Amino acid sequence: MAELILKADKERSAMRHHPWIFEGSVDTLKGRARAGDTVDVFAHDGRPLGRAAFSPHSQIRARLWSFDIEETIDHAFFKRRVAAAVAAREALPELRGQQGLRLIHGESDGLPGVIADRYGETVVLQLNSAGAEKWRDAIAAALVQATGCVRVFERSDSDVRGLEGLQARTGFLHGEEPGGPVAIEEYGLRLEVDIAGGHKTGFYLDQRENRRLVRELSAGRSVLNCFCYTGGFSLQALAGGASQVLSIDSSGAALESARRNLALNPQLPAKRAEWRDADVFEELRVLKKSGARFDLIVLDPPKFAPSAAHAGRAARAYKDINLLGFRLLNPGGLLMTYSCSGGIGQELFQKIVAGAAADAGADARILRRLGAAADHPVALAFPEGEYLKGLLCQVV
Ligand code: SAH
């Protein structure tokens, strides 16, 4: 097996079990390794650090599978790791029995570059690193064994694959195409999931608990849901007794899917729902001009800052929508606001929201800090895993 030797004093992060080894930390590669091959990793002074997947095209030159240099990386390894991830979800009461569930959350589940989401009897697998790519079949087989699911669909078409030198790849790895659309039930509501064409693996599972919170907060309130995608927050608001729900998204396909989801739940008061195909930045201004006001506003925009390099422009975009959000609230109204940008930390996000409130002339306070559901854990050694942060604010 090839050996990857780090530069002097570059072993600290791996010693603390951070799984990424950057190109700049590598001194030499002894022997030959191709993309995805397992290499032994050593500190400059010869201390063993673990076993990693080599990635010659990426700035993240290797991702550690194991911090034990004795651990063999083989089919049995993936069977163990996948089974542990699935069992960890089953052990948590809030996750047990969820039909839509993240089974593997990459680095934080000890499987760098591997994302697996379960939708009913279907697992959607996304492989984002050269190492994950190499072990595709082992990971898919382990998922079938650990879950009993009847099909595994690969959805490896994220942008980050390009950085690893990997082409997009989608299709069934196990089982056959289902007869109709894949659907899940989430806290009493039926939702269609477009596993082949939807965002991420088809749905935003990370917001599950926050959608439930919206349901609890919606009774008698007028709700504005910005960036509504397939209507998850909107439908829970209706289920919670909202007096009206206006939902905005700039994707016609997402809105069509949202309308279908509403129709799948005939118990909901469809007449209280309005869907608007518009740019949120513009539409919030239109609403302000028309004198509209709401009791609860959800702002769950796409990733404005994928990395810290985009933070400046992203900060202005977050400030803009939050400022308009505060201005559109009735007295006592609630703003539920999110950032899923890795490049914007919790502290910075709070500063941006505080700046928006100040500029809107709103006295607001934080009622709750929000994040991703427990099936999206964050390994303490891997703070990069914490991407979703939210605030529930109330204006006086
Ligand atoms: N809240 C959703 C997920 C939101 S994803 C849920 O819980 O499921 C972000 C959404 O924002 C996508 O549907 C995308 O189509 C939409 N979007 C992106 N930019 C937009 C813009 N400028 N105006 C309106 N919608 C936008």
Image: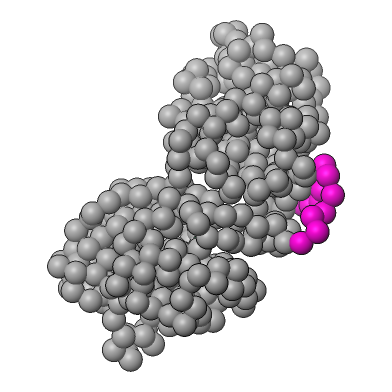
Q: Look at 50% across and 57% down and name the residue there.
A: 188
- Residue, x 35% and y 77% (percent of image)? 243
206 to 149, vertically: above or below = below
Quadrant including the C terminus: bottom left
Residue 129, position as x, y percentages in the image:
69, 39
Could one spot residue 224 in this view of the protein?
Answer: yes
Image position, residue 392 (x, y; %): 29, 57
Direction from residue 274 to residue 6 in the image, left or right: right
Percent x, y of residue 9: 49, 19
Q: Which residues are magenta?
A: 165-180
Q: Quadrant of residue 193?
A: bottom right
Residue at position x 74%, y 19% in the image: 76
- Whether residue 169 appears in magenta in the rendering, the answer is yes
Give the residue displayed 27% in from the left and 56% down from the top: 351
Which quadrant of the figure has residue 217? bottom left
Quarter where residue 333 is shown: bottom left
Asked whether 141 or 94 is in front, the reply is: 94
Is residue 59 among what the camera can see? no
Q: Is residue 194 magenta?
A: no
Q: Nearer the viewer, residue 5 or 252?
A: 252
Q: Is residue 11 left or right of residue 171?
A: left
